[in-house]
Image (cartoon, rainbow, N blue to C red):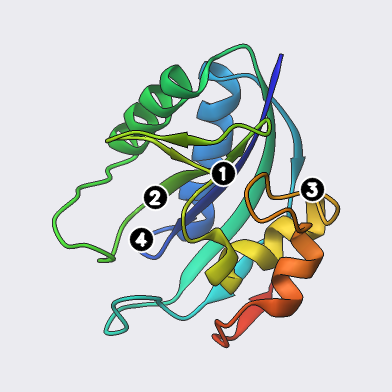
Amino acid sequence: MNRAYLLIGGNMGDRRGFLATACAKIEMACGKLLQQSSLYETAAWGKEDQGAFLNQALELETPLDAHTLLDELLQIEKTIGRIREVKYGPRTIDIDILFFNSAVVHEDHLTIPHPQVQNRRFALEPLNEIAPDYIHPVLQKNISQLLAECPDKLDVHKIS
């Protein structure tokens, strides 16, 4: 079995509902959710003229390899209404693979670990809740250390 850490989030429509739907679909198609962080609300990052995001980190045990997992997650995004029009734009759901085992992958359509995880407080805060001791396979620092050093000062609020 493989272990993946995912970040799900969105800022359109029924944000809580879309996150719950994503969790259910991930469990149906990809494997067992071992842990789910609380929900965190964050102002938009990258393109600030839009509504706040809800984000949640997930720990997934999956029989899928990283490429197949990515394909499944993209399909789940599509079924929940994700339309990719504007980079960093508003979305019903976004599902990112942050880490996959301790793999390091650099390919056209798949980069693991997520290349910006260490620079995004909205990813590190929920991830720190469920995996503070996970070691970033490239930076060789745990999630708690990365959060303490994160240059992103955007407010991230735990809401449930």
User: Mark 4 and mark 3 in contact (Cβ < 8 Å)?
Assistant: no
Q: Is residue 103 visible?
A: yes
Residue found at x 80% / y 51%: 130
Q: Can you identify the residue that label 2 sits on?
A: 93
Determine the secondary structure under disc 3: loop
| For residue 134, above or below residue 71 | below
* Residue that label 3 marks: 134
In whole angstroms, how far apart are the C-alphas of marks 3 and 4?
Answer: 33 Å
Nearer to us of marks 2 and 3 is 3
Residue 85 lies, with reference to residue 159, above or below; the image says above
- Circle 2: is it few (<14), some (14-19), or many (20+) Cα within 10 Å? many
* For marks 3 and 4 on the same chain, the one whose residue lies earlier in the sequence: 4
Look at discs 3 and 1 and give the one toward the viewer.
3
- Quadrant of res 35: top right
Q: Where is residue 75 in the image (x, y as percent from the top left)?
A: 33, 27
Which is more foreground, mark 4 or mark 2?
Answer: 2
Residue at the spot 54% in from the left edge and 56% down from the top edge: 16
Identify residue for label 1. 20
Q: Which of 91 and 114 is in front in this view?
A: 114
Disc 2 + disc 3, Cβ < 8 Å: no
Residue designated by label 4: 13
Q: Which amino acid does label 2 sit on?
A: Ile
